[in-house]
Amino acid sequence: MTSQDPALPWYKEGLRFKCTECGKCCTGAPGFVWITQEEMEAMARHLAISVDLFKRRYVRIRNNRLCLVEKKSENNACIFLEGKRCQIYQVRPKQCRTFPWWKENLHSEESWNVAARDCEGINDEAPIVPLSQITEQLEKSHT
């Protein structure tokens, strides 16, 4: 394939990103951090509590799906965000692990720039993440 191949995405040369651990992607407008049963079990194990207790404390159902609750009093921050740190980072949900490599952020250069407004890790000084790594993360985010 050449660099002119129309089958390649607009970000074929890679994109600049390095997580700064600012926590901004864990706060803001109300949204949903979708979780699976397996992720819930891993988070409960990590917290050394039962899955039932985990569900009572940290889970709600929206649109017939499981999601984490938010801290309404703290700008809708994720329930597991303390300061700028995720308390379950090692077992965070796939949705969190794959940010910012989400389909909606990669749709166009404009959508990537919109994501950059809230994510300080998307900047001109960040290292270039190659297309192969972006593609791998994008596939993970939708499986």
Image (cartoon, rainbow, N blue to C red):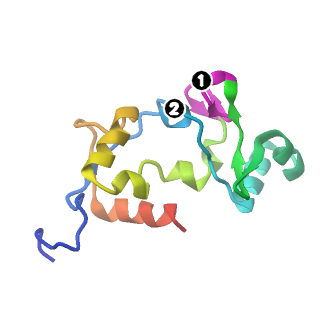
Nearer the observer, 99 or 128: 99
Instruction: Report the residue at 17% width, 72% height from top.
Output: 6
Find residue 83 and name its label. Answer: 1
Which image quarter is the C terminus in? bottom right
For the residue labelled by badge 2, is the local secondary structure a helix, a strand or a loop? loop
**In this orientation, which residue lies closer to the viewer: 3 or 18?**
3
Three-letter code for the amino acid on which mark 1 is drawn: Gly
Taking 136 as reference, is 97 above or below it? above
* Residue extent of the magenta highlight: 73-86
Q: What residue would you read off at disc 2? A: 23
Task: Choose between 87 and 80: the one closer to the eye.
Answer: 80
The label shown at residue 34 is: none
- Where residue 118 sits in the image (x, y, percent)? 40, 33
Q: Do labels 2 and 1 touch, CB within 8 Å?
A: yes
Provide residue 52's location: percent of width, then percent of height. Answer: 89, 50
The residue that appears at 50% across and 60% down in the rendered structure is 141
x, y percent for residue 22: 47, 29
Q: In terms of image quadrants, where is residue 108?
A: bottom left
Q: Is residue 128 visible?
A: no
